[in-house]
Image (cartoon, helix red, strand yellow):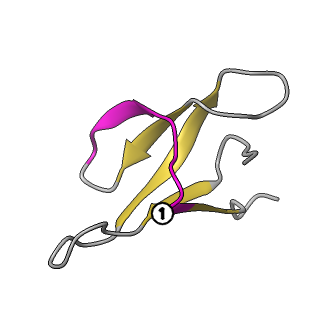
Amino acid sequence: MRANVGDRLIVEGAHVGEGRREGVITEVRHDDHTPPYTVRWEDGHEGLVVPGPDARILPGAAR
């Protein structure tokens, strides 16, 4: 998985009743654009994320 700042990270709920989480990648820590990423989630929280198999990256609007 590779991403750029501004790309969207979508994480599907892993269990019944868990909703989808969406956020914007605000920091890419490696030159090869691999995880971990800093993500600002829709609720305003930010965190360091290593996406799992239930995640996908959508290109940001600027690209």
Which quarter of the image is occupied by the C terminus? bottom right
Q: Secondary structure at mark 1?
A: loop
Instruction: Name the amino acid, label 1.
Output: Asp
Horizontal side of 21 relative to 9 (left or right) equals left
Residue 50 is one of the magenta-drawn residues: yes
Q: Tell me what residue is drawn at x 18 percent, y 78 percent.
A: 16
Q: Which residues are magenta?
A: 44-55
Q: Tell me what residue is drawn at x 33 percent, y 70 percent.
A: 20
**Picture layout, residue 28 above or below residue 6:** above
Give the tally of numbered discs: 1
Residue 34: x and y in percent read 72, 34
Q: 26 or 21, which lies in front?
A: 21
Q: Residue furthest bottom?
A: 16
| Quarter assignment of residue 37 | top right
Residue 59: x and y in percent read 72, 62
| Quarter assignment of residue 58 | bottom right
**Picture layout, residue 30 above or below residue 19:** above
Horizontal side of 8 relative to 1 (left or right) equals left
Q: Dot 1, how many residues are within 10 Å of its Cα: few (below 14), some (14-19), or many (20+)?
A: few
Residue beneath label 1, please? 54
**Picture layout, residue 55 above or below residue 12:** above
Q: Tell me what residue is drawn at x 24 percent, y 52 percent.
A: 43
**Picture layout, residue 28 above or below residue 56:** above
Q: Tell me what residue is drawn at x 57 percent, y 58 percent.
A: 8
Residue 15: x and y in percent read 22, 70
Residue 36: x and y in percent read 57, 29
Q: 27 or 49, which lies in front?
A: 49
Residue 24 is one of the magenta-drawn residues: no
